[in-house]
Image (tube, grey):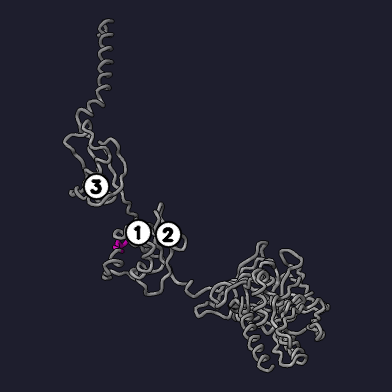
Amino acid sequence: MTKRLILLIILFQVSLYAQSNAGIVSMDFGGVRAGYDITNTLNTPTQRASLAMTNPDYMVTPGDLYQLTFISTTGVQRLSVLVAWDYSVSLSNMGKLNGENKTYLELRHEILELVSRTYPLSAPELVIIEAGSFPVFINGEVKASGEVTTWSLIRLSELLQNRATDYASIRDIQITDRYGKIESYDIFTALRRGNLEQDPYLRPGDRILVKQAKTQVRLDGAVFRADTYQLLPGETLKDLIENYGEGFLDNADTTRISITRAVDGKGSVGENFEVSYEDAADFALSNMDRVSIRQLQSFLPVVFFEGAIYEMAKTGTTDIALTASQRISYSFYPGETLADAVRNLRDQFVQMSDLERAYLRRESEVISIDLSRYLYDHDFTENIELQPNDVIVIPFRQFFVTVSGAVPVPGRYPYVPDRSWRYYVNLAGGIDPLRNSYDLFKVYSQEDVVLDEVNNILPEAKIEVATNSFLFYFNQYAPVITTILSIVSTTLGIMAATGNL
């Protein structure tokens, strides 16, 4: 009999191990469980049951379904145990227990002790098959008031996700339990400081009231944690910066804190003013204030780049055709040179940027400078130290060649490297023999200088095919001459006939 009992105990432990490991899903909870997927947990009973058994905070909930397994003289016994609406737990002939205000682990300990007393050496075990769910009522500053189904391992902050409006307060949320006791909770303290007592698990019968935020302000700029915050009554600008923004960055300008006040400002549409941090402790903030902490670098001197250059912040790419000149500002530190600026902006030059023909305007002085040397040749012999309000102009280089004059189709044609004048003239239909004699033409550079080298045309060159044919000009003026001679001949004939000649 003893050997048989030992064998049953061993088989029972193996069965329990297999059941306890079946269907367990590993879950990663970061922070204070913000962003937990409520819908997912409500639709996966196995996942809920596994999580409830491994979380010491899981409270016994009406609707919980347990499986009690133990060994009796007749073999392995399995008993389904349901937690009733009044938290009572019936264990058949072993009696009834009350699970209210108890965790699953506490109730499990009581049940296992009761079974062990009733059936010695029975090796009892209790596992959760399904975790109970229940409705809670939510109203106030939410998208829709009503009942929401949840379960015992969902915290208040998780339930409010995607349900609270943009104007809902997270600093004073009231929960009324099923006995009528009211408690207020501060979700911000829980999420920022990790004080989970301010982000409780929800329980059956809870009624949640979400209030409207009273003072909501925006903090931007040189602080560690810029964001929109809800302040408590009596909190000042100093509290916002130190307690919410976690303090200034090292490069913050603390002497000129910009405040944009949309409500209760001097004007009907608000006002903007500056406050020193020395006065921050006594400076009260209003709802919808915007607080901006500038960086000291925002007061650096600037120079301007104009012409064939793109502003990356707007386009994000330079693989684009410029259709008009751009103007961007560039902040620099004292002592910084033009070569430094050009290297920092190298990704903003485009294929149309004529770096070789760039120049710098400094008041009335114009300085020609080949910027390509800074990028490709690393030649800094003629480097220039930047001064405030310098303007660096990068001309356009258009990749086309213009053909005009005695050709059938004059116009602008795409530039192709290493092509002679005849290539572009042929694109324009070739030389018109009725208008041009001896193939006379001229090639001009983009500076309108006549070129002698015509077998390697460069971008923006202009080819002018001369109109010099005598027959062309004769045909142009012959009708006029003929008409004039006819008028003269007719006039003389009339005068001769009338005797006035």
Residue at mark 2? 327
- The span from disc 2 to disc 1 (Cα, nearest Å) is 10 Å
Taking the magenta stretch, the answer to whether it contains residue 369 is: yes
- The span from disc 3 to disc 1 (Cα, nearest Å) is 22 Å
Q: Secondary structure at mark 1?
A: strand
- The span from disc 2 to disc 3 (Cα, nearest Å) is 30 Å
* Residue 217 found in image quarter: bottom right
Q: What residue do we see at 71% from left, 90% from top?
A: 122
Q: Residues within 10 Å of mark 3 (few under 14, many from 20)?
A: some
* Relative to 496, 322 lies left or right: right
Q: Image height check: is 474 above or below 301?
A: above
- The outermost residue toward the left is 438
Q: Amino acid at mark 3?
A: Tyr
Q: Nearer the viewer, residue 146 or 490?
A: 146
Q: Secondary structure at mark 2?
A: strand
Residue 381: x and y, percent? 26, 70
Nearest to N terminus: mark 2 or mark 1: 2
Residue at mark 1? 394
Residue 500: x and y, percent? 27, 7
Residue at mark 3? 444
* Relative to 101, 311 lies left or right: left
Q: Amino acid at mark 1?
A: Ile
Nearest to N terminus: mark 2 or mark 3: 2
Q: Which residues are magenta?
A: 366-371
Q: Residues within 10 Å of mark 2 (few under 14, many from 20)?
A: some
Q: Image height check: is 380 above or below 393?
A: below
Q: Amino acid at mark 2?
A: Arg
